[in-house]
């Protein structure tokens, strides 16, 4: 999923195409371009490779890429631009990409903002908001202005930090490239990436090498680097093409463990660990664990250990907390008592429990998604298309769900070593009732339910709504339970303790939706669910084959929430999973 500037530019261009077409009221095309843009985002550099291999003909084989999209991509790679795009830009010189990042700001709004207030970009928009001009646009009013302000605030909160799911592949790529530099012994990332936090401020790398200057030169000349902040003998700092900062330090190989521990953080964890070390007569730094010359002083004496993280923690009488747990709360207490959880290992998930197909807003057939899942090493997936309340994505009616089940039966006869489960992502309506009939739900193997509307109900009403859904005996799982979209939508408000207690009582699982901007449940909720004995599932919410590679991100959230393999239902083989579900 590597993304160079080319792939990123195509992703942006097609999203803008979608917006321009929508603004002009063209039917169908906006959705097609949006899917094309999602495809560019998911495929990254594969786009260019595919084009080089066989031009338009090969491009059309990619999911979400039809004739007209393929022609545009071809024109882009041949000539460096797309004429139709340039013409649209001239007609509407608006920063669609920048403005579209604000939740609730659709194409028609952007058109109005330009038409009435000549708003072209975020700076213009902020000025217009400040002067309260936005509410004066015909049919807009004060409420729209407030909503826009909220959206802008959310976007700005997230600015500067990037989602783990998009940073991790980039960090892996840089580590691989540095590891290949002559004389490099080891290279790894530390900081928030190693702790697998949901958002990442900057990338912290370090390496051990025979010749550090060699490494510095290679680093600042990487293709991912946009500009250089500074470069010394053993430390360099750069700005990457995606706007993030990245530091690389070269350290002596003997102190690798100590450095790794120090730069993994987080800061609170390190502060607590250092305090504990002091109380035991040691001092800890990025160079290792040292004996104090005298207890009570802070003077550093003899070096004790520094080669590995494990020996540092061990020397202090504790187990090593996995990086995902290092948040400076109770993990050190558990480590001292040898009571750290046996975290779910990466690679444990056997099936994806939330997959959209071209029956609704996914861009690939059921069979195509199944093949992709199989290629990723999964042995099953649940098809969970949306239901009719989501009319804008063509949500399925009861009859469609039954029809889809028949197609799945046929496919299952054909596929070897892979099982497709008949499922749904059934809408929870405002009053907590469900969007499909009970008799339909009863025919499915996997009933996920979720909220896609009335996000701002009162806490009491939202709690009641979810409880009613959980109490329906057909329901197996609450999907993306918080309904947040990082940087775009606040989580909904309800009494999580009550929901967890009811989920336990009614044997309903909670989902960890691994899609990077959802990451929903969050780690703290996972931990509460695990404590209460509520089962979880990890799924990707895939709308494209490439999205299924998000599973490790869900496993990371589970690990941050102290979950073991046995807490996660879809680590079971499909037979065991089905018999678990049948017992309900
Ligand atoms: P980020 O970049 O905001 O996503 O979060 P981190 O945790 O990667 O933070 P960063 O990049 O500032 O520093 C990386 C690690 O280095 C941090 O987790 C702990 C360690 N570290 C950095 N500065 C300090 C410091 O002043 N004191 C201590 N104890 N540790 C530090
Ligand atoms: Ca960092
Ligand atoms: Ca840093
Ligand atoms: Zn959903």
Image (cartoon, rainbow, N blue to C red):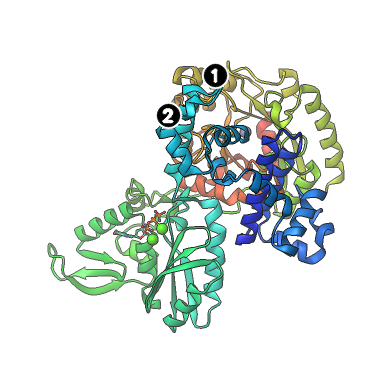
Q: Where does the N terminus fall, quadrant-wise?
A: bottom right
Query: Where's residue 383, x and y in %?
Result: 73, 37
Depth check, front residue: 505 or 538 = 538
Residue at horizontal 27%, vertical 65%?
A: 284
Is residue 60 visible in this depiction of the protein?
Answer: yes
Q: Say what secondary structure mark 1 lies in.
A: helix
Horizontal side of 448 relative to 66 (left or right) equals: left
* Total numbered labels placed on residues in the image: 2
Depth check, front residue: 72 or 179 = 72
Query: Where's residue 398, x and y in %?
Result: 77, 22
Horizontal side of 362 relative to 272 (left or right) equals: right
Q: Quadrant of residue 518?
A: top right
The tag on residue 180 is none
Q: Which residue is mark 2?
A: 132
Is residue 515 visible in this depiction of the protein?
Answer: no
Whether the residue carrying mark 2 lies under 8 Å from ligand 4 is answered with no
Query: Where's residue 172, x and y in %?
Result: 55, 63
Which quadrant contains ligand 1?
bottom left
The tag on residue 465 is 1
Depth check, front residue: 444 or 252 = 252
Label 1 CA crowd tier, 10 Å (few <14, some 14–19, many 20+):
many
Of callouts 2 and 1, which one flags the residue occurring earlier in the amino acid sequence? 2
Horizontal side of 496 relative to 112 (left or right) equals: left
Horizontal side of 294 relative to 11 (left or right) equals: left
Q: Say what secondary structure mark 2 lies in.
A: loop
Query: Where's residue 432, x and y in %?
Result: 58, 18
Q: Identify whether 67 is placed above or below 263.
A: above
Q: Where does the C terminus fall, quadrant-wise?
A: top right
Residue at horizontal 69%, vertical 58%?
A: 81
Label 2 CA crowd tier, 10 Å (few <14, some 14–19, many 20+):
some
């Amino acid at each position: 999923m590597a993304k160079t500037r080319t792939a990123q530019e195509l992703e942006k261009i097609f999203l803008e195409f979608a917006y321009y077409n929508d603004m002009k009221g063209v039917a169908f095309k906006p959705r097609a371009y949006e899917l094309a843009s999602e495809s560019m985002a998911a495929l990254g550099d594969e786009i260019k490779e595919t084009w080089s291999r066989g031009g338009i003909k090969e491009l059309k084989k990619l999911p979400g890429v039809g004739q007209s999209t393929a022609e545009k991509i071809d024109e882009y790679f041949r000539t460096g631009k797309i004429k139709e795009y340039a013409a649209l830009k001239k007609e509407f010189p608006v920063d669609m990409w920048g403005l579209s990042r604000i939740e609730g700001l659709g194409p028609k709004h952007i058109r109005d903002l330009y038409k009435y207030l000549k708003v072209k970009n975020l700076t213009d928009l902020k000025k217009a908001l400040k002067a309260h001009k936005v509410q004066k646009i015909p049919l807009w009013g004060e409420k729209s202005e407030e909503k826009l302000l909220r959206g802008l605030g959310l976007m700005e909160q997230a600015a500067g930090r990037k989602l783990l799911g998009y940073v991790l592949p980039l960090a892996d790529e840089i580590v691989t490239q540095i590891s290949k530099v002559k004389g490099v012994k080891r290279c790894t990332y530390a900081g928030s990436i190693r702790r697998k936090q949901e958002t990442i401020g900057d990338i912290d790398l370090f390496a051990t090498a025979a010749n550090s200057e060699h490494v510095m030169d290679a680093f600042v000349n990487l293709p991912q680097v946009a500009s250089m902040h500074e470069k010394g003998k053993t430390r360099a700092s750069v700005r990457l093409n995606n706007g993030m900062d990245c530091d690389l330090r070269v350290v002596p190989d003997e102190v690798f463990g100590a450095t790794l521990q120090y730069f993994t953080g987080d800061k609170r964890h390190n502060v607590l660990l250092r305090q504990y070390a002091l109380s035991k007569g040691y001092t800890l730094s990025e160079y290792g664990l040292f004996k104090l010359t005298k207890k009570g002083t802070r003077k550093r004496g003899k070096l004790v250990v520094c080669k590995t993280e494990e020996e540092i923690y061990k020397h202090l009488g504790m187990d090593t907390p996995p990086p995902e747990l290092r948040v400076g709360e109770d993990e050190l207490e558990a480590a001292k008592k040898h009571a750290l959880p046996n975290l779910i290992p990466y690679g444990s998930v056997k099936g994806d429990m939330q997959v959209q197909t071209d029956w609704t807003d996914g861009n690939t057939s059921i069979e195509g998604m199944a093949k992709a899942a199989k290629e990723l090493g999964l042995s099953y997936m649940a098809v969970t298309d949306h239901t009719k309340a989501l009319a804008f994505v063509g949500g399925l009616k009861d009859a469609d769900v039954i029809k889809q089940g028949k197609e799945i039966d046929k496919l299952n006869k054909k596929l070897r070593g892979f099982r497709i489960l008949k499922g749904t992502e059934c809408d929870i309506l405002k009053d907590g009732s469900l969007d499909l009939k009970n008799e339909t739900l009863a025919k499915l193997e996997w009933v996920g339910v979720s909220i896609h509307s009335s996000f701002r109900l009162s806490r009491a009403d939202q709690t009641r709504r979810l409880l009613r859904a959980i109490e329906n005996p057909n329901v197996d799982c609450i999907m993306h339970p918080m309904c947040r979209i990082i940087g775009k939508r606040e989580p909904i408000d309800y009494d999580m303790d009550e929901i967890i207690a009811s989920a336990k009582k009614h044997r309903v699982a909670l989902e960890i939706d691994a899609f990077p901007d959802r990451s929903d449940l969050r780690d703290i909720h996972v931990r509460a669910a695990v404590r209460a004995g509520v089962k979880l599932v990890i799924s990707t919410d895939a709308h494209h084959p490439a999205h299924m590679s998000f599973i490790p991100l869900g496993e990371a959230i589970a690990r941050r929430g102290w979950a073991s393999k046995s807490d996660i239902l879809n680590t079971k083989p499909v037979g065991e999973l089905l018999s678990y579900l049948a017992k309900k």
